[in-house]
């Protein structure tokens, strides 16, 4: 484990009464920012960068914009993983391109919803899993940034959604097939709704069916194949064996886990 920012409390040998002050409590958003800034240390001038989506990745994109503005980074090309990140990057004057023009990406930085002990991920609770998987899968290095609440024993272990992107055509049929395939893991499925109760539509015009799992899925590559074989499924939010590095920020400091 590498502690890479200042210890949260310091004791002094010279002090007659050596009482450590209590560690300051950091908010979840501050932890996300700490992880994000640490990840941006991996960014060098002239890189093609995959720009992630979500509240953690947003801090990394902000930081890249700031370093460009200060001329501490030069000649960066960003490949955004969502329309929202595209808007953010444009507002920061980060030059953008896409996978067609840049099929090989030097480094992607993105958040995750869950990270297991083998650095497999659940992503897509913000709805951006498909573009993320395409872009991060095309990256030489993929750095994941999370706060400590995202660490799980096994994927699905948080009991929160494991998203699957499906085509809108007869999505109820696809959702039912998904439930049948995943029944052995105590799976419930729900279509993702937007803020006003309408069906949520992804950047690609698709829907998301969220799986809620009672049991450990065991061999994830088998489950992944089963889900992807279902007609109507576009992609799922399990990112298996894709992360090169996971940066975890917690009250304990920052831990960097490498594949
Ligand atoms: O679709 C959303 C992305 O996969 C996010 O990277 C993921 O949901 C983590 O988001 P956040 O950093 O907001 O927790």
Image (cartoon, grey):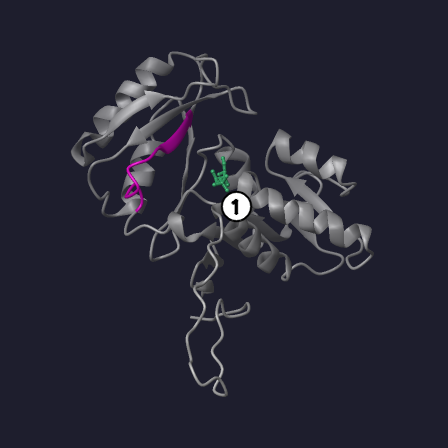
For residue 257, above or below residue 18: above
With 164 as the anchor, is 56 left or right in this view?
right
Horizontally, residue 178 falls left or right of residue 78, namely left
Q: Secondary structure of the magenta portion, mostly?
A: loop
Give above or below for 27 relative to 224: below
Is residue 253 located in the magenta-colored stretch of the structure? no
Q: Which image quarter is the C terminus in?
A: bottom left
Looking at the image, can residue 258 be seen?
no
Residue pictured at 23% horizontal, 30% vertical = 187
Q: Tell me where residue 226 appears, x and y as whole percent.
A: 29, 35
Residue furthest to the front: 16
Mark 1 neighbour density, 10 Å: few (under 14) some (14–19) many (20 or more): few
Q: Eyeballing the image, is 40 above or below 183?
A: below
Q: Magenta segment range?
A: 155-165
> Residue 34: percent from the left, percent from the top?
56, 56
Residue depicted at 63% across the width and 61% down the height: 42
């Amino acid at each position: 484990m590498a502690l890479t920012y200042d210890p949260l409390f310091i004791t002094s040998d010279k002090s007659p009464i050596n009482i450590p002050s209590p560690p300051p409590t950091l908010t979840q958003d501050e932890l996300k920012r700490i992880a994000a800034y640490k990840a941006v240390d991996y960014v060098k001038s002239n890189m093609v960068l995959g720009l992630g989506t979500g509240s953690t990745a947003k801090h990394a994109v902000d930081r890249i914009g700031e370093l460009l503005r200060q001329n501490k980074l030069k000649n960066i090309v960003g490949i955004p993983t969502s329309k929202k990140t595209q808007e953010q990057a444009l507002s920061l004057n980060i030059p953008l391109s896409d996978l067609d023009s840049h099929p090989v990406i030097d480094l992607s930085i993105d958040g995750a919803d869950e990270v297991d002990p083998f650095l497999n991920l659940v992503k897509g609770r913000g709805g951006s899993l498909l573009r993320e998987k395409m872009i991060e899968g095309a990256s030489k290095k993929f750095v994941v940034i999370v706060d400590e609440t995202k660490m799980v024993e096994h994927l699905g272990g948080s009991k929160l959604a494991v998203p699957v992107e499906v085509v809108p055509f007869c999505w109820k049929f696809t959702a039912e097939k998904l439930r049948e395939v995943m029944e052995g893991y105590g799976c419930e499925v729900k279509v993702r709704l937007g803020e006003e109760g309408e069906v949520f539509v992804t950047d690609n015009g698709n829907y998301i069916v969220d799986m809620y799992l009672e049991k450990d899925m065991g061999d994830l590559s088998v489950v992944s194949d089963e889900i992807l074989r279902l007609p109507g499924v576009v992609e799922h939010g399990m990112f298996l064996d894709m992360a090169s590095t996971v940066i975890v920020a917690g009250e304990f400091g920052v831990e960097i886990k490498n594949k």
